Amino acid sequence: MIERVAVDRGAILFDPGRVESPDWRLFDRAAWRARGALRERPGGRGSIHFIDDGARHWALRRYLRGGWAAQVARDRYLYLGEERTRPFREFRLLWQLRGMRLPVPVPVAAGYRRGLLAYGAELITERIFDVRSLAERVRADDLRDADWAAIGACLRRFHDAGVHHADLNAHNVLLDGAGQVWVVDFDRGRIRGPGAWQERVLERLGRSLAKVSGGSIAWRDGFAVLRAAHDA
């Protein structure tokens, strides 16, 4: 069951089985750092930190804009109502996808705090251990056909369930040491009916692979295996 608690100028959604006394300190990086429990994800742009504090092993993500919009408001979004805030929508979607037994992070807590017109937002999920992104694996050139096929089959599961990932790229597909595929970062994702969007999602992933490969075309054969497994 998801619960909600009001905080100063905002609110938090949380899983009461994982968070006992929710308040904004959950998202306070300085407080976690003072406890010696916080570290930044290597290679990240500062939006994601890992929390390791006793039995809590969490990933803390601040919602940040990219592209031209970041020049105007890096971490602020127009407030259009609580249920339309990015963290609440992503938290509820992850909760739904977990109920469908899809390989996504376990949602822990989501929060926003607003000013007059805009809000800032945070999301905490359970950390997934022993994983490397598809981008890392492509750069290291250590993907087997079986890995590509597993990714394609996994993405087909999401598409059969009507899950539209709004920004599927090589950084948002993870593979663990056992060969399990995970998909992360469902900001602006949603459930919808079948359509041309499924093909566009795969095309977006292909463009991302071309970008992270540094000009190499070695990824193309693997991507063909991925597509075949997805379409089978």
Image: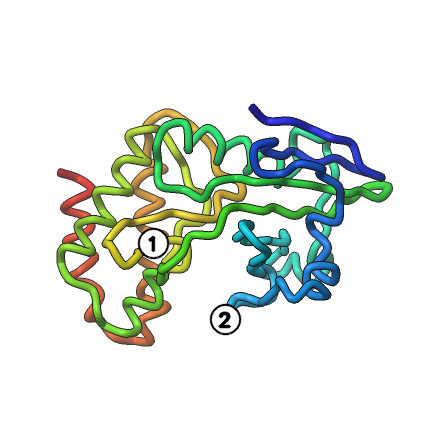
- Please state, as top left, top right, bottom left or bottom right, where the N terminus lies in the image: top right
Instruction: Name the spot of residue 138 as percent of width and height, x first.
Output: 28, 68
Residue in the foreground of this view, choosing between 108 and 191: 108
Residue in the foreground of this view, choosing between 199 and 125: 125
From the viewer's perspective, is residue 32 above or below residue 150?
Answer: below
Give the CA distance from mark 1 to mark 2.
Answer: 22 Å
From the viewer's perspective, is residue 178 above or below residue 11?
Answer: below
Instruction: Name the spot of residue 37 as percent of width and height, x first.
Output: 62, 62
Q: Looking at numbered disc 1 in the image, what kind of residue is underneath it?
A: Leu
Q: Looking at numbered disc 2 in the image, what kind of residue is underneath it?
A: Pro
Left or right: where 127 falls relative to 196: right
Mark 2 falls on what kind of element?
A: loop
Circle number at residue 42 = 2
Depth-wise, is mark 1 or mark 2 nearer the camera? 2
To which quarter of the image does residue 135 belong? bottom left
Circle number at residue 215 = none
Which numbered disc flags the more N-terminal residue, 1 or 2? 2
Circle number at residue 205 = 1
From the viewer's perspective, is residue 74 above or below residue 142?
Answer: above
Badge 2: few (under 14), some or many (20 or more) residues near its Cα, within 10 Å? few
Left or right: where 203 falls relative to 118: left
